[in-house]
Amino acid sequence: MIMVANYQYGWTLFVGPIGEKFGWNKAAIQVTFTLFVLFETWLVPAEGWLVDKFGPRWMIVSGGILCLFSWLFMSFASSLGMFYFAGIIGGIGAGAVYGTCIGNAVKWFPGRRGLAAGLTAAGFGMGSALTIIPIANMIKNSGFQHTFLTFALIQGIVTIIFGFFIMAPPSTFFTAATKIAPGASRYQATPGQMLQTPVFWVMYVMFIMMAAGGLMATAQLAPIAKDFGVDKTPVSLIGLTMPALTFALFFDRILNGLTRPFFGWVSDHIGREQTMFIAFLLEGLGIIALANLGTNPVWFVILSGLVFFAWGEIYSLFPSTVTDTYGATYATANTGFMYTAKGTAAILVPFTSIIAAKGNWHPVFMMASALAIIAAFMAIFVLKPMRAAYTSRPAGTVDAGAKLATR
């Protein structure tokens, strides 16, 4: 997870240099990011089905190979079409790794799914923190093409090697006595059965609403900092002094990683929907604050960190909620279908470049804030009662084909 993190979270550092070298506008370049996220997410259900059927090892190894070639191709790409193609194969590879690791985590730890999914997703959210500064320095000193090549080899090779150590729990691992989270169901729904339930689609819409703002910040943080006029301004905090953008990227990645196990652990104790309400509301308020105070370099660093902290937990809360609701037997495929909502949300990213073409990001911030706040209230007043009704049904009313967990 750490090795595939830069394909999403390190991308923003390359947008400016690519545009300067080839003279392309930001919206055209960011199509690469959108294609990456679309293929990272929309193929995960199929990859999850293969993992549930054949095991996780070769899916991760194959994903590592694709990730290696993605940035390798970008290192010598000279057309938008080549960047788009490289983004697509990188998305397929990163999605194979991400979906497999998350699905495997919620299977191994049924009583602590929020924490397990959060710790695993933290690798992706926080994985780029240690490499953001080296990547920024290498781009500055050696150019973005050399940086793509160097990190393609490092990230791809390490992913491939560690992929051979991944294994799924044995079929005897699940029993009727296995501890599960409070409010979780023991029914095991197939992806087809899950897709027929309104509960899934409510969660799907909420995921899109939350993912949109975070993906915009992920892809556009460097352009936002530049338009706010703070990107190169030195900021001193916690004993460190760095340009505001570099500091924000470093700080954001750490908080984006920490939030996933933290809110996952909280949700294991107080419930998924209550935790969603707290985190989503905090996200909406944080975005409003960043829109109004972000032209101050110190506040830009602090508030962008808050936005990432209140956003990253969706990658632990939604997989654990899906598995609680529909069971662990088909967890990799089921959580994979939920993960496609991230790809749907990514379609909005190039449009944010168009809306803010003249440097006015306020409408984008307000839209993202409104979506997060609405999602917060949906968690309590829509999702919670619907999911409670679904998971508490008598055994005789369970969807056709779904069965109680006996293995």
Image (tube, rainbow, N blue to C red):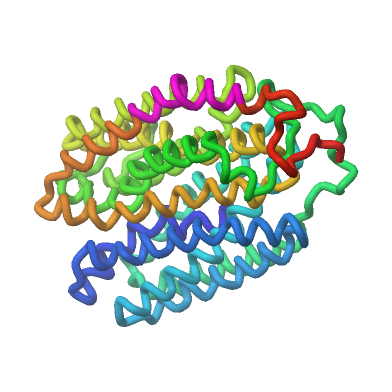
Q: Is residue 85 magenta?
A: no
Residue 376 in picture, x, y percent from top left: 40, 26
Q: How many marks?
A: 0
Q: Residue at x 27, y 43 (%)?
A: 244
Specify whether 169 is left or right of 86: right
In the image, the segment drawn in magenta is 373-389
Q: Residue at x 86, y 37 (%)?
A: 406
Residue 21 in picture, x, y percent from top left: 23, 75
Residue 278 in picture, x, y percent from top left: 44, 21
Specify whether 371 is left or right of 25: right
Residue 76 in sight here: yes
Specify whether 118 is left or right of 239: right
Q: Residue furthest right?
A: 172
Residue 115 placement: quadrant: top right
Q: Residue at x 60, y 46 (%)?
A: 335
In the rendered view, would you say 185 is above or below 253?
A: above
Q: Residue furthest top?
A: 270
Residue 356 in picture, x, y percent from top left: 16, 50
Q: Residue at x 65, y 54 (%)?
A: 100
The answer to which of 9 and 399 lies nearer the viewer is 399
Residue 254 in sight here: no
Q: Is residue 378 magenta?
A: yes
The answer to which of 334 and 81 lies nearer the viewer is 334
